[in-house]
Amino acid sequence: MVEIKTDASLDAMREAGRVVAAALAATQEAAAVGVSLRELDEVARAVLAEAGATSPFLGYRPHFAPTPFPAVICASVNDAIVHGIPDGYRLRDGDLVSIDCGAIVDGWAGDAAVSFIVGTPRPADQRLVETTRQALAAGIEAAVVGARMGDISHAIGTVARAAGYGIMEDYGGHGIGRSMHEDPSVPNEGRPGRGYRLRHGLVLAIEPMFTAGGRDAYITDPDGWTLRTVDGSRAAHSEHTVAITEDGPRVLTAL
């Protein structure tokens, strides 16, 4: 069931979004050659704790997962697309890192992700990261009252395909509110003018996930969580929680 939020609820979700934005900013600032993914998780934990927020990621166990998720961020490096578990891996020069983070404040959730390069960037990685950001911006621009879900999906997919990138099968964005994952789903590719009609008060987590090799398939690590490209190519992930309003899209996880 799709839940439409009140304006007061949108303001409350903005507070959760501020915490997510702060956690992502702190995590990206801490990311440097030699820093472990587990240390980045500790940085995000500290931001959430200081804000009095809890994590919707920690202990989360969807139907596909063999174990509850053990961290407050997903940390996916290079060919890992999403859901990477922060561990003792220490960042190396040129690593492409995607950090996904959520927060719950007063019962409302926020969810966002950012990709960046540690140390010396490779031009191909810079292009991948920037294109994923551009696709997110295009998806947000299409998130207006009266449009259809397919308009968001088409905007994202058009950017990916024009760049020659793959779009992860079976995964995309989602509704968000009292729970991190709510209806409706937000595919990263679709036909314009089709699907759920967007209304004031609908809140969506819009999240392009692109693979440099151009293939849509993925493989799952033995941990049951980390999803990787099938060809070893690199991936990027960009996400914001966005409210549909009569005044245009409102990005609730902006810094």
Image (spheres, rainbow, N blue to C red):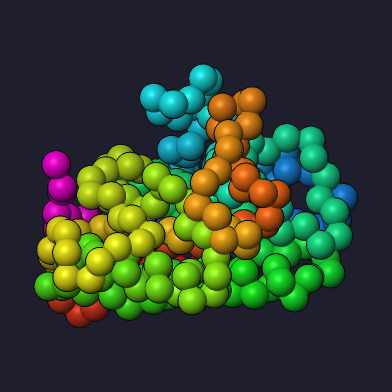
Q: Which span of residues is magenta-colored?
A: 1-9
| Quarter where residue 170 is shown | top left
Q: Name the residue located 54 percent from the left edge and 50 percent from the top edge.
A: 100
Q: Residue at x 52, y 60 (%)?
A: 166
Where residue 239 appears, x then y in whole percent?
A: 46, 60
Is 135 left, or right, of 106 in this rendering?
right
Q: Quadrant of the N terminus?
A: top left
Q: Nearer the viewer, residue 136 or 16?
A: 136
Number of numbered tags placed on the structure image: 0
Q: Is residue 196 above or below residue 184?
A: below
State whether the magenta stretch is mostly helix, strand or loop. loop
Residue 243 vs residue 100: left or right?
left
Is residue 5 shown in magenta?
yes
Residue 240 place in picture, x, y as percent: 42, 62
**Image position of 40 (left or right of 36):** left
**Along the horizontal axis of the image, is 164 left or right of 204?**
right
